[in-house]
Image (spheres, rainbow, N blue to C red):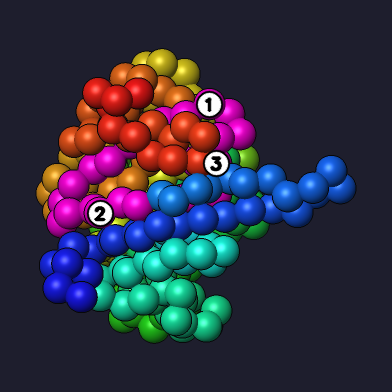
Amino acid sequence: MGAAMSNPLIARSIKQQINTASGVISILEDVSLELKVGESVAIQGASGSGKSTLLGILAGLDLPLHGKIWMNGRDLTELDEDERALLRADQVGFVFQSFYLMDDLTAIENVALPLELFGQANAFSKAEEWLQKLGMGHRMRHFPRQLSGGEQQRVALCRAFSVQPAILFADEPTANLDTVTAAAVLDQLFCLQREHSTSMVIATHDRALAQRCDRVLHLRSGRLVAEDQA
């Protein structure tokens, strides 16, 4: 599939359902998406519309009921869990609303952890470089509980970009931040994205954040529609 080789992420006809006591609920229905190199795409939708579910499937954290996903030419639906984990480690970065830092690790240890887990040399020196770059050098020996929300999200950005991902997935990355802090964090996020030509998919309720992306898509009734069709 030629397109799958040229774009870092392609999804075709994704469908997902969940079984509940009251019956089957359709979450995603015939979702297709192509993400270009260095492109940023925002996905908006009401709470419960399936944005986080879609991000998890696109990142290979979960498999769809039906459909295909190619990440840099590899079909995620044909890989087992271990193979998908290795591909994510090599290709993917994550930024979440709740930061998901390890409470018992310092900032530098949190950033160095994924580098160490996959055998990268000089993990701590690389982690320090990233923390210095985002203005967190003076806080790198602090634990998450000693950091503000904005500082924690900056550490999370360092952790995500330190592995030099081809694709970054962000799920409501500014939802726990005040307006001023959110704006500063977003400036850094988009600066890093442009600098490293990282492709990015962001699920967000934040209209201002969405408008900073190259494209805005809306998830409605399980389907993605473009901004001008929403």
Q: Is residue 21 left or right of residue 56?
A: right
Element at label 1: loop
Q: Amino acid at mark 2?
A: Glu
**Tag 2–tag 1 contact (CB < 8 Å):** no
Magenta span: 32-55
Of all residues shown, which one is farthest toward the top?
179
Q: Is 166 placed above or below 201 here?
A: below
Q: Please rate how many residues cluster around mark 1, counting C-alpha atoms within 10 Å: few if below 14, some from 14 to 19, many from 20.
A: few
Q: Amino acid at mark 3?
A: Gly
Question: Which label is found at residue 50?
Answer: 3
**Residue at image mark 1:** 46
Q: Amino acid at mark 1?
A: Ala
Element at label 2: strand
Res 186 seen here: no
Tell me what residue is drawn at x 62 percent, y 46 percent: 26
**Residue at image mark 2:** 34
